[in-house]
Image: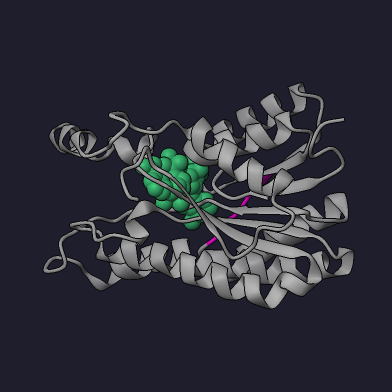
Amino acid sequence: MSRLEGKTALVTGASRGIGRAIALELARNGASVAVNFQSSEAKAKEVADEIAALGVKSLVVQANVAVSQEARDMVKKVLDAWGRLDILVNNAGITRDKSLRKLDDESWLQVIQTNLNGCFFTVSAAIPAMLEHAFGRIINISSMNGQIPAYGQANYSASKGGVIAFTRTAALELAKSNITVNTVAPGFTETDMFTEVPEKIQDQIKQRIPMGRFGKPEEIAKAVVFLAAEGDYITGQQINVNGGAYM
Ligand SMILES: NC(=O)c1ccc[n+]([C@@H]2O[C@H](COP(=O)([O-])OP(=O)(O)OC[C@H]3O[C@@H](n4cnc5c(N)ncnc54)[C@H](OP(=O)(O)O)[C@@H]3O)[C@@H](O)[C@H]2O)c1
């Protein structure tokens, strides 16, 4: 029997990059997976098709997680379709990098609204159903840069540090109900988000990674699935998947 057979999952921002890898890894382990996207509909459908080809159920759900009602409606759609939500992975995230002197209100607010507030909206919407079934595995994707300073990322660092702090309190409050809440914090991982970083800076970053290479989305996904499938007694914790870049 597959480790996650009979379980249902929702992965935000699953059309590309790390979210896509997480959705596929959950499906490989037997979970039915709802694939959320904001604008890349065709890519989200491709992911859902790949999931269906693995012999489990898939669902495509469009929503901007930064908008409370859309995030909550997305969770409701999954519950309406499958009756339960066992695994919630808050992965959707954006960057709007600018040095603090140039950082405008909009770039600050967009990043906090998507990366941090979006996380609260989905968790808040999922809690009643998880309580009803006395089961929940919530995994929030933070970042190495939520733990260490990163030039040009005051907004992003604040959002990801906030995700870590939010995770711990949510874990404390939900522990008695068999709902675990944990964080996976990737280091530099090869996705569209990271290719926006200029090549020269990428080379400098690589030299600071003890393992000498960037991460792959699949390597982040394995940590997420470990928490979902094996993390019954793990809550309020954080797994850093970063090649040793931050110890
Ligand atoms: N890549 C890295 O080096 C790295 C390092 C540390 C942490 N992370 C974190 O890992 C997560 C995934 O990053 P990634 O590198 O895979 O990013 P990515 O390649 O840029 O993909 C971002 C995903 O999030 C979705 N998304 C963005 N804003 C959204 C919104 N408002 N509502 C719903 N979906 C939204 C996108 O959907 P559309 O395709 O529809 O636009 C896409 O599926 C993020 O939280 C990021 O902060 C990444």
Outermost residue, top side: 53
Residue 217 against residue 113 in the figure, above or below = above
Residue 31 against residue 146 in the figure, above or below = above
In-front residue for pair 210/181: 210
Horizontal side of residue 49 vs 154, given as left or right: right
Residue at 77% across / 74% down in the picture?
176
| Residue 166, visible in the rendered structure | yes
Horizontal side of residue 72 vs 244, given as left or right: right
Residue at 57% across / 32% down in the picture?
42
In-front residue for pair 217/113: 217
| Residue 64, visible in the rendered structure | no
Which colour assignment does the render follow? Answer: one colour
Q: How many numbered callouts?
A: 0
Image quadrant holding the N terminus, namely top right
**Quarter of the view holding residue 20:** top right
Residue at 76% across / 55% down in the picture?
77
Q: Magenta span has 61?
A: yes
Horizontal side of residue 120 vs 162, given as left or right: right
**Quarter of the view holding residue 190:** top left
Q: Magenta span has 91?
A: no
| Residue range (magenta) | 60-65
Residue 189 x, y percent position in the rendering: 38, 37
Residue 9 x, y percent position in the rendering: 73, 47
Horizontal side of residue 137 vs 196, given as left or right: right
Residue 224 x, y percent position in the rendering: 60, 44
Residue at 32% across / 31% down in the picture?
211
